[in-house]
Image: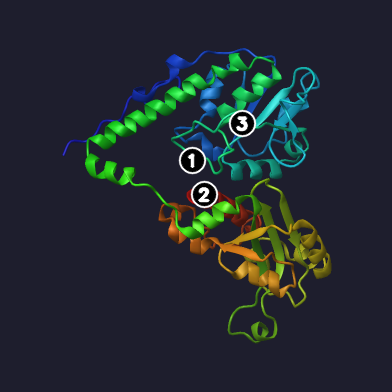
Amino acid sequence: MTEELPRALCPRCRRPEVVCYCAHVRPLTTRTRVVILQHPRERDVPINTARIAALCLPDAALEVGLDWSGLPALADPTRPAILLYPGEGAIDVEKSPPAGPVTLVVVDGTWAQAQSVVRKNPRLAALPRYAFRPAAPSDYRIRREPHESYVSTIEALAQVLGALEGDPARFATMLDPFRAMVEAQLEYARSRSASRHAPARRARAERPRVAPAPLRALHARAADLVCVHGEANAWPYRTREKAAHPDELVQWVARRLSTGETFEAIVAPRAPLAPSTSWHVGVPAASLLAGESLDAFRARWRAFVRPTDALASWGRYAPSLLARAGGHAPATAFDLRQLVRLAPELASLAVGEGRGGSTEPRAGRRIESLTTLANALVDRGR
């Protein structure tokens, strides 16, 4: 058996030479300063488009990290920073573009990663937010977007820069290397597939895919989905305290899938705090004890929930905690732990139980995973 030699890489685009797209790159100058903040997990993704954008925009800055509290570009009065980030309160960049040159800040990563970066960086979160309506569905056919209205980083930059600088045609050329990369990758995959088991694979691929009915139901309610996770003050099993004090809700996190709107609450325990609760939850005991009252939580949660909402949780434990706390629950709920069994290819996204003892509350990690999984299941239900 001969050992396969490593493929030669292009030193410029860092892609294998067989799928290099550099011949299609046309560098562009801009009066807009472009700053791309890349999540570390995206840095090594081979088909990430931020690298293409950096080659097309040689004056752009491509930074990798999670903490942007000291980023100088955010404090330049000559080109004030704006954040490209959709959701409630965002300004349509094509209908109401900012006056004068700006610093356009773009977070590169999955939707869940981008949400996490903005939430954990108050300076980013405080920037004026701009958004846009994609002119066409994404051409990113080698990487699934979680929703049909989502586009890749380079597609977003091409459209937004065209709006900011009043020259859409010039910035449309940024998509040439992107499309070349996609086509080369697809062609390479086809040629590899043709060399082994091609007839059987083609037959399977040509069969019309019909998603299971529960996944189609989830997809139909995508605009209404609210992912939820709850943490409990829970005494160990087989103890006297467990019998006297059933699990009670002490932390509740929810995220509206369509907008990224987030609800967070720490609720003061009504029973004595179990010794291991703080460790498991990842929240200091003092913070738990100083949480809001159950009545205050119920009122805030009822104001957040819409009549048309549908809850999405991992298992039934979180909804049971909410019900025990007397919190309002919409009539429709989806158990993603059951639904992922219908899409085994998404098993790697399953929300693990995790461990406590982290400096970050476990609920934050769990809601990120839950949101990623929900987006993938919605896409699978088409």
Callout 2 amino acid:
Ala
Viewer-closest of 211 and 81: 211
Q: Quadrant of residue 96?
A: top right
Q: What element carries label 2?
A: helix
Residue picked out by circle 1? 144
Vertical side of 228 occupied by 271: above or below: below
Q: Quadrant of the N terminus?
A: top left
Residue picked out by circle 2? 376
Viewer-closest of 322 and 6: 322
| Lower position in the chain sequence, tag 3 or tag 1 | 3
Vertical side of 106 occupied by 100: above or below: above
**Badge 3 vs badge 1, beta-carbon distance below 8 Å:** no
The crowding category of the residue bearing disc 3, from other C-alpha atoms within 10 Å (few below 14, some 14 to 19, many at least 20), is: some
Residue picked out by circle 3? 134
Whether residue 50 is visible, yes or no, is: yes
Whether residue 276 is visible, yes or no, is: no
Q: What element carries label 3?
A: loop
| Lower position in the chain sequence, tag 3 or tag 2 | 3
Vertical side of 239 occupied by 303: above or below: above
Mark closer to the observer (3, 2): 3
Callout 3 amino acid:
Pro
Q: Is residue 53 left or right of residue 177?
A: right
Image location of residue 305, percent across then percent down? 74, 58
**Badge 1 vs badge 2, beta-carbon distance below 8 Å:** yes
Q: Distance between the residues labelled 3 and 1?
A: 16 Å
| Lower position in the chain sequence, tag 1 or tag 2 | 1
Q: In which quarter of the image is residue 277?
A: bottom right
Mark closer to the observer (3, 1): 3
Q: Residue at x 80, y 69 (%)?
A: 294
Vertical side of 108 occupied by 210: above or below: below
Q: How many marks?
A: 3
Q: How far apart are marks 3 and 2 (CA)?
A: 20 Å
